[in-house]
Image: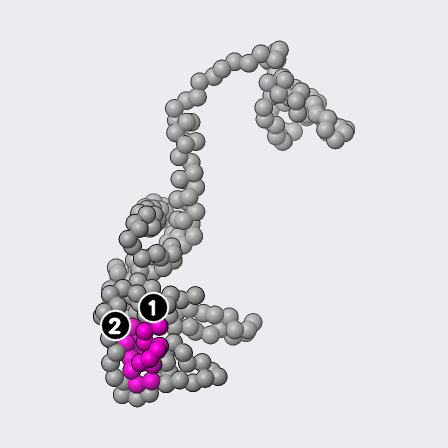
Amino acid sequence: MKSLFDNCIYASGTVRRQRADLPKIVKSKKKLKLKKGEHKWRVKGLKTDGTKTDVGCPAVVKQYTKRMGGVDHFDHIKGTYSVGRRSRRWWLRIFYFLLDACITNAFILYSKNSNSTKLSNLEFRIALARGLIGGFSSRKRRSEGVNYIVRKKVAVSDNYQKSVHMIAPEIRFSNVGEHMPVDLPSYQRCRHCSTKIKDKRSKIMCCKCGVPLCITPCFLNFHRQAPA
């Protein structure tokens, strides 16, 4: 490699033999028999004598290199939960990109706010969608507060998935003073401590979350402990 640098060659790569203006040694179908560490190089129309020439860096290249890390970070966040969908209408690609860009920039600004509740990219998008949609639902509500419930699927086995009901963090931990216990007409499984082995039931429900909880200690612990 030292001899390459001595001859002002600072990069190397591969090339197809069909490319125009290549040396005959490259276009030849004969394989170059080189030992480990050996190399061959050719230059067309330029005599290399080992001299170096300073070339000014264009401003656009300097700015691109300086800010490329931010672009990569933006593309990574945008591509994680992209709203884009395939369509034959070309203008939809522009619309989806602008929508993704707005959501991503909003999430980045939200994350920089030290006073805000820490949310992941997915939780932020769910909260945003819930805020835009509001309480609208085409399905019949089963009980008060069901619109706050986020359903997730957990793989119990290869052939079975269990539905797990969770309360979105921005609802569960905001304005805790609004989470007050109310009576239920019948006993229901406590959302915090009830399991298959230990069935715990309560007639108390959180009026905001809409989930049954034991009055003590589950009601307090449910609103204090973040989900794992």
Q: Is residue 212 magenta?
A: yes
Start-end of magenta stretch:
202-221
Name the kind of residue labelled 1 in the image: Arg
| Rendered view: 101 above or below 67 | below
Nearest to the observer: residue 222 or residue 196? 222
The circle drawn on residue 179 is 2
Say few, some or many: other residues with alpha carbon within 10 Å of mark 1 (under 14 / 14 to 19 / 20 or more): few
Depicted 20 relative to depicted 142: above or below: above
Residue furthest left as drawn: 178
Q: Quadrant of residue 31?
A: top right
The amino acid at mark 2 is His
Where residue 214 sits in the image (x, y, percent)? 34, 81
Q: Secondary structure at mark 1?
A: helix
Q: Is residue 187 left or right of residue 8?
A: left
Note whether residue 91 is visible. no
- Does 215 appear in magenta? yes
Position of 62 relative to 126 (above/below): above
155 vs 118, nearest the viewer? 118
Judging depth in this view, the residue of 143 and 99 nearest the camera is 143
